[in-house]
């Protein structure tokens, strides 16, 4: 005699699950990364050591998930001949640029703070940590927006930033592919105003984590999907992909981390209405070798490459 069995709900097909994953990938990576960072603090204020460890952990996590759920078939950090150079630029900044920038920045902040004693008392330390973080993020992003626009507008600065835009493939490692000169300048221009205002170390460290996590995802080849309205609110890979477009009309847009400042200053381009055919730079003016790339912006000051945005700027 057979026992009757309860009717079973149809199992979700693998295809349906695969289609759902891109809609959750951004939130899953962010949730795991910030959850791990909060857990690692053990209820204490976030320390520089924990922040560094979480930066490394997030980088490995994104490296793994972009292999499992790729966005573009042609992009892969394991097959990109520039991947070692991308890592080299990150290492050069970590071990040379950042200590240099921190020393100069701290000396500058100490010098200014001595002369304008009330400046460092301006920061609202009495606000909850999340409110301080939101304020710091808005200010940091505004400074970053202005700095990034200047990098695109001023040919002498553009040569440094061109190394970052020299990207035929977009993947995780492009997040750290920044010329050491640009990174040092960015640290001084973008971080020191917050330090001058007295922004606490813990807020700066959480902000640094957000910047790294968001930057890694925005450059990664991880398939990420969002509803169309979210592009007006959240930084994401689609907005930044438009910024990396080979077409100069598109790459002079979406400068900010947050879309807010691009909306305010009229440089916002919605990814659904601005399809990107290719990323990189017309004419590939940046040399392929690592040392040549480090030297490139200095050489270009005296002798701009023939086929380049800088030459086009000069001709306008
Ligand atoms: Zn740019
Ligand atoms: Zn970028």
Image: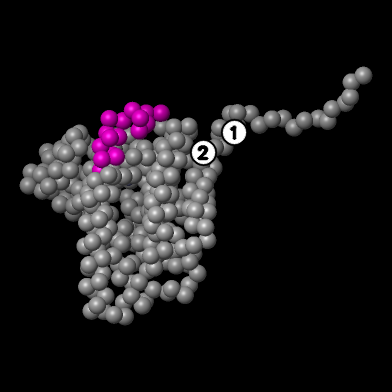
Which residue appears at 30% of the width and 70% of the height?
196
Residue 311 visible in the snapshot: no
Q: Which residue is mark 2?
A: 22
Residue density around tag 2, few if under 14, some if 14–19, many if 20 or more, within 10 Å: some
Q: As drawn, is 41 to the left or to the right of 301?
A: right
Which residue appears at 25% of the width and 71% of the height?
110
Q: Residue most toward the top?
A: 1
Residue 200, located in which quarter of the rendered image?
bottom left
Label whose residue precedes the other's in the sequence (2 or 1): 1
Quadrant housing the N terminus: top right
Numbered disc 1: secondary structure: helix
- Region in magenta: 73-89
Residue 108 visible in the snapshot: yes
Residue 121 got which mark? none
Q: Point out residue 207 in the picture as x, y percentages from the top left corner.
A: 40, 58
Which residue appears at 22% of the width and 56% of the height?
100
Q: Which residue is mark 1?
A: 17
Towards the viewer: 293 or 243: 293
């Amino acid at each position: 005699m057979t026992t009757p069995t309860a009717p079973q709900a149809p199992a979700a097909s693998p295809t349906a699950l695969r289609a759902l994953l891109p809609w959750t990938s951004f939130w899953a990576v962010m949730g795991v990364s910030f959850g791990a960072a909060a857990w690692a603090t053990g209820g204490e204020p976030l320390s520089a050591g924990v922040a560094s460890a979480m930066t490394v952990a997030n980088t490995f996590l994104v490296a793994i998930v972009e292999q499992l759920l790729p966005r573009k078939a042609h992009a892969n950090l394991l097959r990109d001949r520039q991947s070692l150079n991308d890592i080299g630029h990150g290492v050069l900044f970590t071990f040379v640029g950042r200590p240099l920038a921190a020393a100069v920045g701290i000396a500058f902040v100490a010098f200014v703070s001595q002369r304008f004693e009330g400046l460092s008392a301006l920061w609202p330390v009495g606000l909850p940590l999340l409110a301080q973080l939101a304020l710091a993020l808005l200010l940091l992003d505004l400074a970053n927006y202005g700095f990034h626009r200047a990098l695109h507008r001023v040919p002498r600065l553009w040569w440094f930033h061109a190394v970052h835009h020299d990207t035929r493939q977009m993947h995780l490692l492009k997040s750290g592919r920044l010329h050491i000169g640009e990174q040092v300048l960015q640290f001084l221009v973008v971080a020191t105003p917050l330090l001058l205002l007295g922004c606490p170390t813990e807020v700066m460290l959480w902000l640094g984590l957000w910047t790294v996590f968001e930057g890694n995802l925005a450059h990664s080849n991880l398939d990420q999907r969002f509803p169309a309205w979210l592009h007006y609110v959240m930084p994401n890979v689609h907005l930044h992909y438009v910024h990396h477009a080979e077409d100069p009309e598109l790459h002079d847009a979406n400068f900010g981390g947050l879309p807010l400042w691009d909306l305010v200053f009229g440089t916002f381009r919605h990814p659904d209405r601005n399809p990107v055919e290719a990323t990189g730079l017309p004419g590939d003016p940046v040399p392929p070798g690592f040392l040549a790339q480090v030297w490139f912006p200095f050489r270009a000051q005296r002798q701009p490459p023939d086929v380049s945005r800088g030459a086009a700027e000069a001709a306008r």
